[in-house]
């Protein structure tokens, strides 16, 4: 017994030397030399050389490595590529801004898609970053009830109750989406206020049967009872408990507003009692949605603690009045709502449980800056300037936590969100002294600064802080289909 114990360190030490020796003889496709490698899973925070071959991390070494291509990244942080769980913008335009903000995987988990296979087909082989989606309760409900909206419901799906037959058809579309590899089920209950609690519970049951999480925009926002964010959170915590499923609550700050500490306490309590619940926030003090949506139905001022002047019309940047509000609500379009207190945004940015996710979408350069600068903003504003959290903790909330949210049902995510041998070479290299967001509410289409290099599956999509669009290495993130 004593002999065996004595042998172990000698053997493992010998293997380590062999491994280093073989890494040093090998020629990798690419070597990033001399960066400060930070991996939230292992806790590694040290100067290392990274060898990349075949789209994967092939070596992490304190000694020199040889590569067909060598890129010096001394003085910079090398982190796992950021994973955005809430990226509505799923176009080339949006992928460019994502890449320049350090995001290597952009997923549409809240509104989601339906039909799912067609959504993936449109992007396969054409995307700068990795992409994927849930099957969405909203698009399924819009299709079955014949809503005339495009992205979000406009009429029938908002307030009409589904008949038994319609409910069956909605559930069929959800099952079909999951059969086609969807990453979970997305919900925006607030946008479809006529949906009964029973309809939501049924869909939670389907998700639990298939062992995928539900990504939910809660039924209500703000603190006015009845109809508060607390009541809405209680609904889905109960649905999770009774179905045995998993829940991810999207944008906790813009839903819970000043009640965010209470909502976080509820989620922590539910987790302590064994429920699988996670949450996310974007690091801004304003929301964005469609003005014609149910969010701005009668009583919004009291519910959201806002008045007309807190609303900003995306197309022009103007602040609204009672008159312009009425006109634009008739016309339809995007509106920004300045409703989240700064201390709430900072609390969520620093909270170890709250994943960073953008909720962003830019259309021809217009939109909320969150789709452009969320990640650089957390690193520059909350880590460096305000010291609200450590750099490693921030990286964990951008990489490992979102990967872990997905990986029980999406095995390919086990190779993302960390830097280790065998992991996908999705890497973000940035200057911690310079990284910052540039996008503003008035002028959102401005790339983040200080992100030097971004690799997606081993291919540069950002190099020397410039976009490289020749490769299109983004891959589809999907669940294996049944039997695979
Ligand atoms: Zn939402």
Image (cartoon, rainbow, N blue to C red):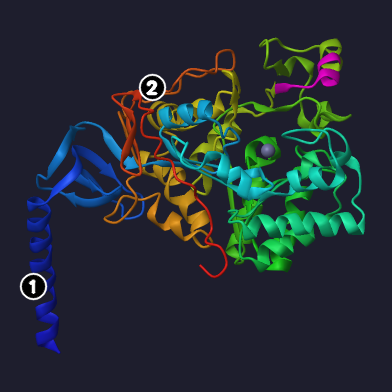
Q: Toward the viewer: 159 or 156?
A: 156
Q: Quadrant of ligand 1?
A: top right
Where in the figure is residue 446, as x and y percent of width and height?
48, 17
- Real-space Cα separation, disc 2 to disc 1, in angstroms: 47 Å
Where in the figure is residue 211, as x and y percent of width and height?
61, 65
Where in the figure is residue 430, as x and y percent of width and height?
32, 31
Q: In which quarter of the view is residue 360 placed?
A: top right
Task: Give me the residue at 47% from left, 31% from top.
Answer: 98
On whether residue 155 falls in the magenta region, the answer is no
Q: Residues within 10 Å of mark 2 (few under 14, many from 20)?
A: many
Which tag, 2 or 1, sits closer to the chain's start?
1
Q: Toward the viewer: 224 or 56?
A: 56
Task: Give me the residue at 77% from left, 28% from top.
Answer: 305
For the record, the magenta segment spans 327-335
On whether residue 329 falls in the magenta region, the answer is yes
Q: Which mark is residue 449?
A: 2
Say whether residue 146 is left or right of residue 21. right
**What residue is disc 1 on?**
10
Relative to residue 313, is residue 128 depicted above or below? below
Q: Residues within 10 Å of mark 1 (few under 14, many from 20)?
A: few
- Ligand 1 lies under 8 Å from the Cβ of mark 2: no
Q: Which mark is residue 434?
A: none
Label 1 sits on a secondary structure element that is helix
How many marks on residues?
2
Q: In which quarter of the view is residue 170 placed?
A: bottom right
């Amino acid at each position: 017994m004593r002999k065996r114990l004595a042998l172990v360190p000698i053997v493992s030490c010998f293997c380590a030397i062999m491994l280093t020796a073989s890494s040093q003889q090998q020629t990798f496709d690419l070597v990033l030399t001399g960066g400060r490698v930070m991996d939230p899973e292992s806790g590694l925070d040290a100067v290392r050389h990274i060898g990349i071959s075949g789209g994967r991390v092939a070596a992490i070494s304190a000694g020199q490595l040889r590569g067909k291509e060598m890129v010096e990244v001394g003085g910079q942080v090398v982190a796992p590529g950021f994973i955005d769980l809430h990226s509505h913008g799923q176009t080339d335009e949006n992928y460019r801004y994502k890449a320049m903000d350090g995001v290597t995987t952009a997923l549409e988990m809240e509104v989601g898609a339906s039909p799912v296979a067609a959504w993936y087909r449109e992007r396969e082989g054409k995307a700068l970053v990795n992409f994927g989606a849930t099957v969405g309760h909203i698009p399924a409900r819009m299709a079955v009830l014949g809503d005339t909206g495009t992205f979000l419901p406009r009429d029938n799906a908002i307030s009409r109750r589904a008949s038994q037959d319609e409910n069956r058809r909605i559930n069929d579309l959800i099952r079909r989406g999951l059969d086609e590899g969807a990453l979970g089920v997305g919900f925006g209950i607030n946008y479809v206020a006529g949906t009964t609690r029973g309809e939501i519970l049924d869909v939670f049951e389907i998700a639990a049967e298939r062992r995928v999480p539900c990504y939910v925009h809660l039924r209500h926002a703000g603190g006015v009872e009845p109809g508060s964010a607390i009541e809405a959170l209680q609904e889905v915590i109960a649905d999770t408990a009774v179905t045995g499923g998993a829940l991810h609550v999207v944008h906790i700050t813009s839903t819970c507003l000043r009640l965010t500490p209470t909502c976080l306490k509820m989620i922590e309590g539910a987790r302590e009692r064994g429920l699988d619940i996670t949450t996310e926030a974007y690091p801004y003090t304003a929301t964005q949605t469609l003005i014609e949506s149910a969010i701005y139905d009668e009583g919004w001022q009291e519910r959201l603690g806002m008045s007309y002047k807190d609303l900003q019309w995306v197309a022009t940047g103007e602040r609204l009045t009672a008159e312009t509000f009425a006109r634009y609500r008739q016309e339809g379009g995007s509106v920004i709502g300045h409703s989240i207190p700064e201390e709430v945004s900072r609390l969520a940015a620093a909270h170890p449980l709250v994943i960073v996710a953008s909720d962003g979408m830019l259309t021809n350069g217009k939109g909320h800056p969150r789709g452009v600068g969320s990640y650089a903003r957390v690193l520059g504003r909350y880590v460096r300037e305000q010291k609200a959290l450590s750099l490693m903790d921030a990286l964990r909330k951008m990489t490992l936590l979102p990967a872990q949210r997905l990986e029980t049902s999406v095995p390919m995510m086990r190779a993302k969100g960390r830097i280790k041998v065998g992991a996908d070479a999705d890497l973000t290299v940035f200057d911690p002294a310079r990284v910052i967001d540039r996008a503003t509410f008035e002028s959102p289409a401005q790339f983040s600064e200080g992100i030097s290099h971004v690799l997606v599956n081993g291919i540069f999509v950002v190099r020397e802080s410039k976009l490289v669009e020749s490769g299109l290495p983004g891959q589809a993130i999907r669940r294996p289909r049944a039997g695979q």
